[in-house]
């Protein structure tokens, strides 16, 4: 079996089980639900745990040799070069407030490179999925799948962009970057988390920024954005999914946005530079 065949099999399975896990979350969506706080003060619910447990069992059924890393249940080492990265509810804050913009994320990593992913938005019945060399695809309801394609916007002043939470810029000491981007673009919104990257991959917004990003937030969306014709990197421009931050764009605007996130340092004259 070729790498391409192995990857296609895993992508097809990921699409199927992401739908199943999404249906589990919908049983609880919009209902009174107990919210617990994890050690880092982030919220978690029974829906998160049940959906991830389902995903883990389904992966073990089909690919028992693969490793698994999930937000809620930790790591299971595998014997193959593949690892599944799971976030059963990306955007738990949206979920617990009855906002339909949360997502189920499944990323597939091969030799430490994110090579395939599914981002499903259960309450909207939308999904994007992709694998390296196999393209990116978008499904909404019974329609599709249709090719996913990023926007062609080349002017930052006309761009629309999204982020998950403005306060995260403050948490990393970069509120200045948020303000510069807000002033430099046409539209800034916080339709973030998994949904934000789906919007990038389908050309509805031009870039998405996360100042704080876990590996389970990034592993699925990185290949989706790339296969849709865009670019995903960390804030230094490295094509990485585990750096702790992320930028997904249509590719055309990527370098310009990185320049705002990491502006070149101002010239400082030598300490003993003679007067002019």
Image (spheres, helix red, strand yellow):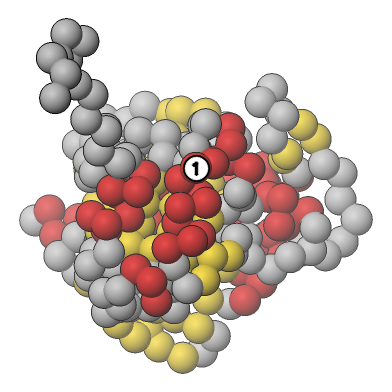
In the rendered structure, the answer to whether residue 209 lies left or right of residue 147 reads right
Specify the farthest residue to the left: 2
Helix, strand or loop at disc 1? helix
Among the 4 quarters of the image, the one containing residue 78: top left
In the rendered structure, the answer to whether residue 16 lies left or right of residue 121 reads left
Question: Mark 1 = which residue?
Answer: 176
Along the line of sight, which residue is nearer the eye, 164 or 257?
257
Q: Residue at x 69, y 35 (%)?
A: 42
In the rendered view of the protein, which quadrant contains the N terminus?
A: bottom left
- Percent across and percent down for residue 274 are 13, 14
In the rendered view of the protein, which quadrant contains the C terminus?
A: top left
What crowding class fits label 1: few (fewer than 14 Cα within 10 Å), some (14-19), or many (20 or more)?
A: few
Res 221 seen here: yes
| In this view, 183 is above or below 176 | below
Q: Residue at x 57, y 53 (%)?
A: 164
- Percent across and percent down for residue 122 are 61, 69
Q: Residue at x 87, y 61 (%)?
A: 31
| In this view, 196 is above or below 263 | below
Among the 4 quarters of the image, the one containing residue 109: top left
Specify the farthest residue to the bottom: 143
Number of marks in picture: 1
- Percent across and percent down for residue 262 are 32, 40
- Percent across and percent down for residue 98 are 79, 63
Along the line of sight, which residue is nearer the eye, 50 or 196?
196
Q: Residue at x 53, y 76 (%)?
A: 126
In the rendered structure, the answer to whether residue 215 lies left or right of residue 83 reads right
Specify the farthest residue to the top: 272
Specify the farthest residue to the front: 276
Res 108 seen here: no
Among the 4 quarters of the image, the one containing residue 38: top right
Along the line of sight, which residue is nearer the eye, 91 or 235?
235
């Amino acid at each position: 079996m070729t790498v391409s065949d192995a990857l296609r099999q895993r992508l097809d399975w990921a699409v199927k089980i992401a739908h199943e896990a999404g249906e589990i979350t919908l049983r609880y969506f919009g209902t009174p639900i107990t919210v617990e706080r994890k050690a880092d003060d982030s919220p978690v619910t029974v829906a998160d745990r049940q959906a991830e447990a389902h995903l883990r069992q389904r992966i073990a059924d089909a690919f028992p040799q693969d490793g698994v890393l999930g937000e809620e249940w930790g790591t299971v080492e595998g014997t193959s070069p593949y690892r599944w990265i799971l976030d059963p509810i990306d955007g738990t804050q949206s979920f617990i407030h009855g906002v339909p913009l949360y997502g189920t994320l499944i990323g597939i990593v091969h030799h430490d490179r994110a090579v395939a992913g599914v981002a499903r938005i259960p309450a909207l019945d939308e999904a994007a999925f992709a694998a390296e060399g196999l393209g990116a695809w978008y499904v909404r309801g019974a329609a599709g799948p249709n090719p996913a394609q990023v926007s062609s916007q080349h002017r930052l002043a006309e761009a629309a962009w999204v982020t998950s939470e403005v306060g995260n810029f403050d948490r990393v000491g970069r509120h200045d970057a948020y303000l510069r981007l807000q002033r430099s673009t046409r539209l800034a919104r916080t339709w973030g988390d998994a949904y934000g990257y789906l919007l990038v991959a389908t050309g509805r917004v031009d870039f998405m920024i996360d100042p704080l990003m876990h590996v389970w937030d990034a592993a699925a969306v990185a290949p989706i954005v790339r296969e849709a014709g865009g670019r995903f990197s960390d804030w230094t421009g490295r094509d990485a999914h585990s750096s702790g931050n992320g930028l997904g764009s249509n590719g055309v605007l990527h370098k310009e946005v990185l320049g705002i996130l990491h502006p070149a340092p101002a010239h400082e004259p030598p300490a003993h530079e003679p007067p002019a």
